[in-house]
Amino acid sequence: MNTPQAGIFALGTSSHAYLEFDILHPAQRREFVSTLSSVREPRTTTGGVNFVIGFRPELWREVAPEDAPADVEGFNRPIQGKDGFSMPATQHDALLWLSGSAYDVLFDMARSVIKDLASEASLGDETSSWPYRHDRDLTGFIDGSENPMLLDAPQVALFPEGVRGQGGSVLLLQKWSHKVAEWEALPVAEQERVMGRTKLDSVELENKPADSHVARTDQDELGKIFRRNMPYGTVSDHGTMFVGFSADQKRLSRMLESMAGLLNGTRDALTRFTQPVTGSYYFVPSVESLLRFR
Ligand code: HEM
């Protein structure tokens, strides 16, 4: 099987930057893919940078049809959920996700990539993120308890050998702004019913409500995904950068529909306390696929 991009599985880094780009000249998309595929990290044995490169699925299909999985699509339409809840579609042409042990190295690398791409693409969106209390998201809950372990994650996240796009993955990048005052006004026992897990130690509730977040995203029902979520934002405006990989886009899109209340009429209680403000899908090609564009 082709080699996956290493950054997908590079857990434990404390600084992240997500750069989303829009092509300036659509006719020159091949050159743009080639420039982005030529990004390299600083050569060092310490303090290095991991990166993940992804492309709008339709764009990747245009430049590498033999290497693009069937049926993968961008986040092209907003999702209209129950009771006026909606998830916006803010698709861009490409993503560069940098991660490392300190923000200064990411900052320098991000600036140099943006400069190298300046004649071909504009920076459409930029977010940086950082871990909170080791493994918690900014709701205060432990995030990732039901994630596959690293030895199982490739099977969950990667297109398998023998299919187009093998070694690649579908990435959903969705920024969720937290309604902090409303969330913090809830007693902890209520917050736990919203999540479906205990706050201190992330034990799944025995009788979790049908509208709890873990009931609405139950992987036994909807299929498994590999999450790399991180907190983002400032003291006064913050939330969760949802970063989810899957070998099957349907698992991700059905989870979003389920959270919005479109699968069985029950909307995820967490969506009353957080609001998505962006939403994009990217195809993350294998290393071999990227090297063809070098
Ligand atoms: C504000 C946004 C979000 C926050 C704060 C959040 C937080 C959490 C937390 C605390 C858990 C329980 C522990 C764990 O297993 O990780 C969880 C579970 C999970 N979340 Fe989220 N999440 C968010 C958005 C999403 C979205 C958008 C998706 C899917 C597209 C998703 C998919 C999942 C899945 C699959 C699980 C595990 C469910 C299971 O038990 O099988 N989450 N999330």
Image (cartoon, rainbow, N blue to C red):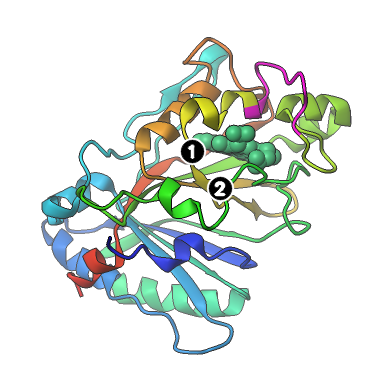
Q: Residue furthest top?
A: 265
Question: Residue 190: x and y, percent?
Answer: 83, 24
> Closer to the N terminus: mark 2 or mark 1?
2
Q: Is residue 184 something one can see in this rendering? A: yes
Is 10 drawn above or below residue 153 in the view shown? below
Label 1 near ligand 1 (CB < 8 Å): yes
User: Start and end of the magenta stretch?
Assistant: 204-214
Question: Mark 2 touching mark 1, by CB under 8 A?
Answer: yes
| Secondary structure beneath label 1 | loop
Residue 72 vertical position relative to residue 98 in the rendered view, above or below = above
Nearer the observer, 280 or 200: 200
User: Which residue bears the numbered disc 1?
Assistant: 224
Indicate the amino acid at tag 2: Pro
- In which of the image's four quarters is ligand 1 placed? top right
Q: In this view, does 3 lie to the left or right of 33?
A: right
Q: Is residue 255 above or below residue 93?
A: above
Spot occupied by residue 222 in the image (x, y as percentages of width and height):
48, 28
Pointer 2 residue: 148
For ligand 1, tell me if the residue under mark 2 lies within 8 Å. no
Q: Which quadrant: the N terminus?
A: bottom left
Image location (x, y in percent) of residue 119? 24, 70
Secondary structure predominantly adopted by residues drawn in magenta: loop
Neighbor class of circle 1 (other Cα within 10 Å; few <14, some 14-19, many 20+) is: many
Q: Residue furthest bottom?
A: 44
Q: Residue at x 87, y 31 (%)?
A: 188
